[in-house]
Structures are given as structure tokens and as C-alpha cells.
Image: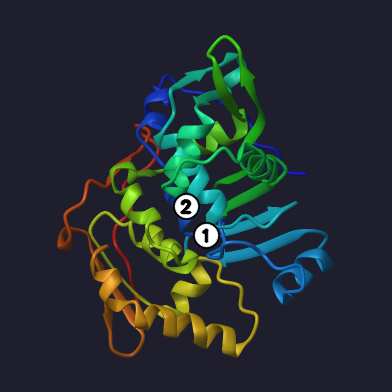
């Protein structure tokens, strides 16, 4: 199996985690499916099992393999809440990253209401922990293989729960361009549709403007193509949500096309790269 040598630079990785929600490449290669949860009777899940619990997605920005579990927008929402609501982020020996948080604060941020459903939160963190991801850039020059979380537990020292980010994910995170929409997160989490949240996240990875056909967009965000009817339903949901999407900088145009203009709505979205490694990715035009 292909291995990547972990080399950590003299770079403030803690600051990058503190000022980021996710890597741009994660949100552009379908790592987190645009659904709330996967049905065990669905075609997508059946194929996942037939492929020995592996899901393959290829987009213009890279190829991903998701192994062990199918991650969804629910997992992405929780990771966003964890990164945004961290009480402390620190670097550990060996390159891992510890993120300390209050379970009640994270659950409230996620749901908008007070909740003590810590078992559900632990179950979702366990699903993230037991999911392995492979990412290869389109040109094949860069390859990463990682689990996002290595462990999570209660820390008596910090009097809070904590997750440990693996050195492998930390290296991937360090190398990649990241996006910070923390100030926009409460607004994003008000969107009830997992499909629309994935669409918004995708367009928010663009620094300026972007145009993409809905067909290509569904493939890029990893939408489960169960059938022609399922696809048509997704297209209809996007079309019927045109007014909502405007509030997030996205305009629906005739012939099933979406246009994103970052400057068209009041926002605080920023990007961060590692010096001498990544450049901010421009907008795209895919008809």
C-alpha cells in the first residue's frame, strides 16, 4: 500500500485549525455525501457493501476513496461545530492535534437547542474515527491516506471532552488550502436540506466566482445517483430553492446552471494556505 512520509514544517498548524472549517479539496470531492444518513436498502449502500465497504468518487479536483463508513453532511456539520466551538486546540507529540470541547455546547450549536444526547454524538464521532479516506489530486502528484480522528475521550485535566486528530490528517490539512466559514456556520446550519448544505459548502470554497451545471455539481459533491428519478428530484429541489440559495451567494440560471458570486452577499468567508505549498484556487466555469 502506498505510504506518505509525514514531514511537518515550521508552520503554526494550530492557528490553521483555529481559523479553518475544512479543506477545500474535501468539499470538492464528495468526501461527505449530500444526505443526512444512508439507507441500508439503498443502491448506494448495496454497492458500498459489494465494494468491500469502499466508495469511489472522482471529480475535476481529485479522486477519493471512502472506506469503512459513508460519511454524510451530518458528520461534516459536527466537525464544523467542533472546529468552530473548540475550547482549546493544541499540538501533541508526534504531530497529532487535540481539540477540546464541551459536548453540550457542540450539540446546541449543531441543533440550535439544548441537548444532552451525548451518546448520539459519540456514535457519530465513532463513525468518523472508523472511516479511512484516500485522496489523490487529479494530476496524481499528491496522495494522502488518513483517518480524521484517532481517538476521543474525556480529559480530567481540561475538564472537557477531546478528540485527537491523526498526524496523517494533520499533514493533509496542513498541505491543503482551507476555508473558514465559522461566522457563517449558524446561517448554514439553518438550511434543513443536506443537499443544499453540500451545494453551499461547495460554492463557498471559491474565492471569487464560479459557474457549474447542476449535473456536474451533483457528481462533484458525491450525490448518490440511485435512479433517474432520484436525480430529477435533486434537480427539482435545487430549482425550487432558488430564492433560498440567493441568500448564500448562489443564483439559479435557466438550463439547470448555478452561478456563485462571493461578493454578492455579506459574508466573512476566508481562506488559508501553508506558505510555499498551496495557492488559492480560482473560480471555475463548467457548463
Residue 272 visible in the snapshot: yes
Considering the image in quadrants, where does the N terminus appear? top right
Marks 2/1: CA distance?
A: 6 Å
In the displayed structure, 46 sits above or below 27; it is: below
Return the residue at label 1: 29
Label 1 packing within 10 angstroms: few (<14), some (14-19), many (20+): many
Return the residue at label 2: 25
Tell me which residue sits at (39%, 22%) in the image: 12
In the picture, measured across the screen, residue 156 lies left or right of residue 24, that is right
Marks 2/1 in contact by CB < 8 Å: the verdict is: yes
Tell me which residue sits at (32%, 46%) in the image: 181
In the displayed structure, 256 sits above or below 285; it is: below
Image quarter for residue 46? bottom right
Percent x, y of residue 89: 46, 22
Tell me which residue sits at (26%, 47%) in the image: 269
Q: How many marks?
A: 2
Percent x, y of residue 62: 53, 58
- Tell me the element at label 1: loop
In the displayed structure, 153 sits above or below 237; it is: above
Amino acid at each position: 500500500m502506498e505510504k506518505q512520509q509525514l514531514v511537518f514544517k515550521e508552520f503554526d498548524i494550530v492557528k490553521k485549525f483555529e481559523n479553518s472549517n475544512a479543506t477545500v479539496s474535501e468539499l470538492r470531492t464528495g468526501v461527505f455525501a449530500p444526505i443526512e444518513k444512508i439507507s441500508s436498502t439503498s443502491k448506494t449502500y448495496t454497492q458500498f457493501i459489494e465494494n468491500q465497504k469502499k466508495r469511489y468518487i472522482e471529480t475535476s479536483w481529485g479522486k477519493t476513496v471512502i472506506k469503512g463508513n459513508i460519511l454524510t453532511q451530518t458528520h461534516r456539520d459536527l466537525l464544523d461545530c467542533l472546529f468552530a466551538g473548540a475550547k482549546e486546540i493544541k499540538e501533541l507529540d508526534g504531530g497529532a492535534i487535540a481539540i477540546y470541547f464541551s459536548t453540550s455546547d457542540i450539540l446546541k450549536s449543531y441543533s440550535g437547542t439544548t441537548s444532552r444526547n451525548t451518546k448520539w454524538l459519540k456514535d457519530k464521532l465513532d463513525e468518523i474515527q472508523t472511516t479511512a479516506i484516500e485522496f489523490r489530486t487529479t494530476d496524481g502528484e499528491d496522495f494522502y491516506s488518513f483517518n480524521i480522528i484517532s481517538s476521543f475521550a474525556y480529559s480530567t485535566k481540561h475538564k472537557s471532552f477531546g478528540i485527537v486528530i491523526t498526524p496523517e490528517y494533520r499533514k493533509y490539512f496542513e498541505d491543503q488550502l482551507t476555508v473558514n466559514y465559522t461566522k457563517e456556520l449558524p446561517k448554514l446550519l439553518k438550511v434543513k436540506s443536506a443537499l443544499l448544505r453540500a451545494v453551499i459548502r461547495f460554492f463557498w470554497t471559491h474565492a471569487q466566482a464560479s459557474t457549474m451545471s447542476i449535473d456536474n455539481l451533483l457528481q462533484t459533491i458525491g450525490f448518490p445517483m440511485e435512479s433517474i428519478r432520484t436525480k430529477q428530484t435533486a434537480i427539482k429541489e435545487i430549482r425550487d430553492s432558488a430564492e433560498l440559495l440567493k441568500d448564500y451567494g448562489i443564483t439559479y440560471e435557466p438550463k439547470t446552471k448555478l452561478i456563485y458570486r462571493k461578493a454578492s452577499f455579506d459574508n466573512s468567508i476566508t481562506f488559508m494556505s501553508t506558505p510555499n505549498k498551496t495557492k488559492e484556487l480560482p473560480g471555475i466555469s463548467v457548463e
